[in-house]
Amino acid sequence: MSDLLERLRGRGWRMTAQRRVVAEVLDGDHVHLTADEVHARAVSRLPEISRATVYNTLGEMVSLGEVLEVSTDRRAKRYDPNAHRPHHHLVCGQCGAIRDVHPAGNPLADLPVDERYGFMVSDVEVTYRGLCPNCAPTA
């Protein structure tokens, strides 16, 4: 059973077949699927699942704080089940591959007080951009 399924069950979330399939599709490391990608994978497991059900289920998981909605560019939102371990993202500028990264240090501490302009900063999102090994030119 996936970590996401365990977390959802721990919250007492009613686990229908459709919800289970969406959670299973999101299981794994470095998962950052669009809603359409989740739907396509869910249909292969449960052919009768509707696009609306997938969108509604993702919205519920985000509202519960069990899945993050990630936007690393101007394209579709992506859904990240790694909601309980602070992390940043590494994004390939060519193919769009996304990886979770956990750099050492505290990015909030890296923002000098005089650069906060009186804001009470509570969260930091860092996106590293570059080319993945598949897209990087070879020497």
Image: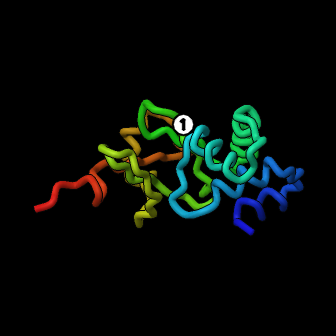
Give percent across and percent down for residue 86: 55, 58
- The residue at the far left in this view is 139
What residue would you read off at disc 1? 77
Q: What residue is shown at x 59% (from left), y 61% (from top)?
A: 85
- The residue at the far bottom in this view is 1
Of the pair 99 and 120, the residue shown nearer to us? 99
Label 1 SS: loop
Give percent across and percent down for residue 95: 35, 46
Residue 92 visible in rendering:
yes
- Picture quadrant where residue 56 is located: top right
Q: Amino acid at mark 1?
A: Lys
From the viewer's perspective, tell me whether residue 6 is left or right of residue 25.
right
Q: What residue is shown at x 47% (from left), y 58% (from top)?
A: 100
Residue 13 visible in rendering:
no
| Quadrant housing the N terminus | bottom right
Query: Height in image: 7 above or below 70?
Result: below
| Quadrant housing the C terminus | bottom left
Numbered-mark total:
1
Q: What residue is shown at x 45% (from left), y 51% (from top)?
A: 108
Of the pair 11 and 18, the residue shown nearer to us? 18
Q: What residue is shown at x 78% (from left), y 41% (from top)?
A: 48
Give percent across and percent down for residue 12: 89, 55
- Picture quadrant where residue 7 is located: bottom right
What sort of colour scheme is used for the picture?
rainbow
Label 1 environment density (alpha carbons within 10 Å; few <14, some 14–19, many ≥20): some
